[in-house]
Amino acid sequence: MGITAIIFALDVLLTACCVYLASRLAWVKAGLNVLLPIVFVVSLISLTPGYGWLLGIVAYIYLLMRATSADFKDAVCIVIFTKLLSVLVLLFISHAGWLNLTINS
């Protein structure tokens, strides 16, 4: 369970950094001290089996709107930018050799 917790913490930190960059792209002012708890709560909600991913996105948009005073359009843009940045960062990490994404069968 220890390595899983470390990976979860790194994922939350990486996602919070991506949210921070995405919020800057959408001209929404938010600090990491505001975004880190949002990402943590959304990550926990998203762990719910079944519809957790959908509940996570809804919570993500709602919490961004409440915490940053952003409107709906800006919150949706931040979520989309964050997902794109996360994919790009994961691709960079995997191509750099720091992450091995192979499946052993």
Image: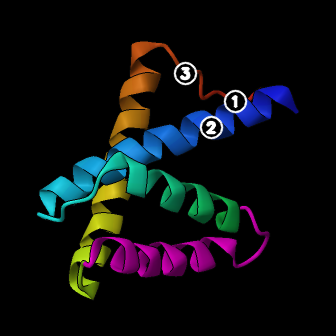
Nearest the viewer among 59 and 101 is: 59
Q: Label 1: state its secondary structure.
A: helix
- Which numbered disc flags the more N-terminal residue, 3 or 1? 1
Q: Name the front one of labels 3 and 1.
A: 1
Residue 75 placement (x, y as % from top left): 30, 75
Residue 28 placement (x, y as % from top left): 18, 65
Q: Which residue is drawn at 62% across and 37% down?
A: 9
Q: Label 2: state its secondary structure.
A: helix
Quadrant hosting residue 103: top right
Q: What's the magenta region?
A: 47-69
Q: Residue at x 68, y 68 (%)?
A: 45
Task: Report the colour scheme.
Answer: rainbow
Q: Mark 1 points at which residue?
A: 6
Q: Residue at x 61, y 71 (%)?
A: 53
Q: Name the residue under label 3.
A: 99
Dot 2 surroundings within 10 Å: few (below 14), some, or many (20 or more)?
A: some
Q: Do the residues labelled 2 and 1 touch (CB within 8 Å)?
A: yes
Residue 74 placement (x, y as % from top left): 22, 76
Q: Do the residues labelled 2 and 3 touch (CB within 8 Å)?
A: no
Q: Mark 2 points at which residue?
A: 9
| Quarter containing the N terminus | top right
Nearest the viewer among 61 and 99 is: 61
Residue 94 placement (x, y as % from top left): 46, 24
Find the distance from the CA under tag 2 to the CA under tag 1.
5 Å
Q: Say if 86 sits above or below 98 in the image.
A: below
